[in-house]
Image: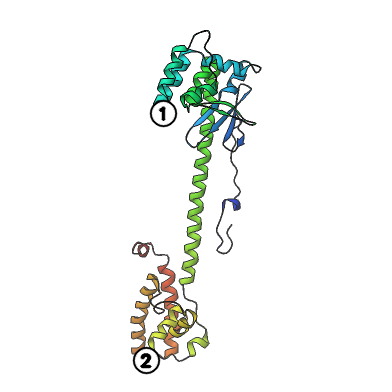
Amino acid sequence: MVFGFGLITPDSLELKVVAFDRLKTYNMSKNKIIDVKGTEITIYKNDVDDYISITDIARYKDSANMDTIIQNWLRNRNTIELLGFWEQMYNPDFKPLEFEGFRKQAGLNSFVLTPKRWIETTNAIGIISKSGRYGGTFAHKDIAFEFASWISIEFKLYVIKEFQRLKEDENNRQKLDWNLQRTLSKVNYSIHTDAIKERLIPEKLTPKQTSLVYSSEADLLNMALFGKTAADWRTENPDAKGNIRDQATLEQLVVLSNLESINAVLIRQGLEQGERLTQLNQIAITQMTSLVKNANLKKLK
């Protein structure tokens, strides 16, 4: 419910969002966690892409030797080629010569490669290392899915399934936020324009106002429409440019033109100024009320 002319904000609306029961997700700044067959896997999102913790994926196979599992995977020639080709596609700063060096050594019994060494030597971006509570080795989702396949093809499918569920949840929430903001914008715009329209509609003049003698017919019309004379307006707005009619809206100018014609008829009918003012004021109220609701007039603005 809206009171007065206050604007609605998201905090003023009670929203009930349906949770996705099968998705266990925790917000941690840019990190989220999905639950895959009882193993919690952290997903880190930078400004562009999602990176999945391959340390967590390795935990599914052996929670005591995660680093060793990752290093064994990196020793594989197929792994080196996967990483190198991915970097060549997406990383303009990748060092291909260093990649070729690792590629030649891959598979040898003496070859050992850690994530840190790969990153620092080749300037890779497909794998990153993070420290802290949710730290570990993270890989771009393209690479992480291949690592999961190396661990277990079945587990890879579950990882993809839960990752897709997470993205669907995020998209649905974004749509909800967007629709909410769009609805709020429409409501606030309506409230704002309605408030302006209500101020445009003239107030009914008091008997005292209609009994006064006005020095000109122009001020008579000003009183009927604006509820004040040109001099009164100038006193209230000493810094404003122009006069009271220069500041009028399109609706007010339309009504003013009509009032001028009607006033001429009333003068010919011999009505006194006070009686004419009463009638003109009533006409102004009626016409302005109609005009502020007229869609065709809005198109002219």
Residue 235 at x, y = what percent? Answer: 48, 83
Relative horizontal placement of residue 279, taking residue 59 as reference (left or right): left
Residue picked out by circle 2? 270
Q: Which residue is painted at 43% across and 73% down in the image?
A: 286
- From the image, state whether disc 1 or disc 2 is nearer to you: 1
Q: Choose the circle earlier in sequence order: 1 or 2.
A: 1
Q: Quadrant of the N terminus?
A: bottom right
Q: Quadrant of the C terminus?
A: bottom left
Relative horizontal placement of residue 49, taking residue 41 as reference (left or right): left
Task: Say which of 70 and 246 sits in front.
Answer: 70
Task: Say which of 55 and 106 sits in front.
Answer: 106
Q: Can see residue 153?
A: no
Residue 57 at x, y = what percent? Answer: 58, 21
Crowd around label 1: few <14 · some 14–19 · many ≥20 (10 Å): few
Looking at the rendered structure, which numbered label has been put on residue 33?
A: none
Residue picked out by circle 1? 90
Task: Say which of 60 and 75 sits in front.
Answer: 75
Report the coloring of the rendering: rainbow
Q: Which residue is painted at 51% across and 33% down in the image?
A: 168
Q: Can see residue 53?
A: yes
Crowd around label 2: few <14 · some 14–19 · many ≥20 (10 Å): few
Residue 300 at x, y = what percent? Answer: 33, 64
